[in-house]
């Protein structure tokens, strides 16, 4: 006589909440707006020429994109120049910052992590998913640990079936 054994998914029954940080990845292309390309001989910002560039530039090419505004040369660029760029990107670009692509990525994750409903995680056992298709900056792991430690019963890294313990409330 053959007996049937029911397969029990203990991970599903454990009450562990899995957070995939890739869910906080901001969609949209990342691009750089380099003010250095507008400088006279790569060193000097001439106001009249800069304003003409700003007026004629195709700002729609940044539609839906995430923009890192930089100046790759050692020139001293007046702050109003960056402000002019920001004014023209507002309402067109998805998001923009002054800083590198890495700083942009950090800011995009920070913005999206701030939307997380932390109260839903209070007293829970939480696993931060450890691998995936999207590269997650170290900042994000540190920030999520900072946000969750005061709330959760335990915090783990990896997959529910194989985790590395990070924190356990005493």
Image (cartoon, rainbow, N blue to C red):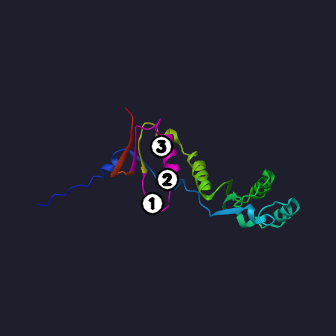
For marks 3 and 2, give the CA distance: 12 Å
Cβ atoms under marks 3 and 2 closer than 8 Å? no
The label number, if any, that marks residue 147 in the structure image = none
Mark 2 crowdedness (10 Å alpha carbons): few <14, some 14-19, many ≥20: many
- In the image, residue 32 lies at what x, y percent? 67, 62
Q: Is residue 109 left or right of residue 122?
A: right
Q: Most extreme residue toward the top, as rendered?
A: 170
The label number, if any, that marks residue 132 in the structure image = 1
Q: Is residue 124 above or below residue 101?
A: above
Q: Is residue 80 left or right of residue 122?
A: right
Question: Between residues 91 and 144, which one lies in front from this camera angle?
Answer: 144
Q: Mark 3 against mark 2, which lies toward the viewer?
A: 3
Question: Between residues 22 and 13, which one lies in front from this camera angle?
Answer: 22
Q: Which residue is mark 3?
A: 145
Quadrant in which the N terminus appears = bottom left
Q: Which of marks 3 and 1 precedes in the sequence?
A: 1
Question: Between residues 121 and 58, which one lies in front from this camera angle?
Answer: 58
- In the image, residue 60 lies at what x, y percent? 75, 65
Q: Is residue 22 above or below residue 15?
A: below
Cβ atoms under marks 1 and 3 closer than 8 Å? no
Q: Is residue 22 left or right of residue 10?
A: right
SS at mark 3 in the image: helix
The range drawn in magenta is: 129-157
Q: Which residue is mark 2?
A: 21
Q: Which of marks 2 and 1 precedes in the sequence?
A: 2
Cβ atoms under marks 1 and 2 closer than 8 Å? yes
């Amino acid at each position: 006589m053959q007996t049937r054994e029911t397969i029990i998914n203990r991970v599903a029954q454990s009450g562990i909440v899995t957070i995939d940080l890739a869910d906080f990845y901001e969609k949209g292309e990342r691009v750089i707006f380099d003010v250095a390309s507008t400088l006279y001989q790569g060193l000097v910002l001439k106001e009249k020429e800069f304003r003409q560039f700003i007026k004629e530039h195709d700002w729609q090419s940044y539609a839906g994109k995430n923009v890192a505004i930089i100046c790759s040369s050692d020139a001293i660029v007046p702050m109003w120049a960056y402000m002019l760029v920001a004014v023209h990107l507002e309402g067109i670009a998805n998001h923009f910052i002054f800083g590198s692509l890495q700083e942009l990525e950090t800011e995009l994750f920070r913005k999206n992590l701030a939307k997380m409903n932390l109260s839903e995680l209070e007293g829970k056992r939480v696993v931060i998913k450890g691998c995936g298709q999207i590269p997650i900056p170290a900042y994000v792991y540190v920030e999520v640990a900072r946000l969750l430690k005061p709330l959760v019963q335990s915090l783990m890294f990896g997959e529910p079936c194989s985790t590395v313990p990070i924190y356990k409330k005493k």
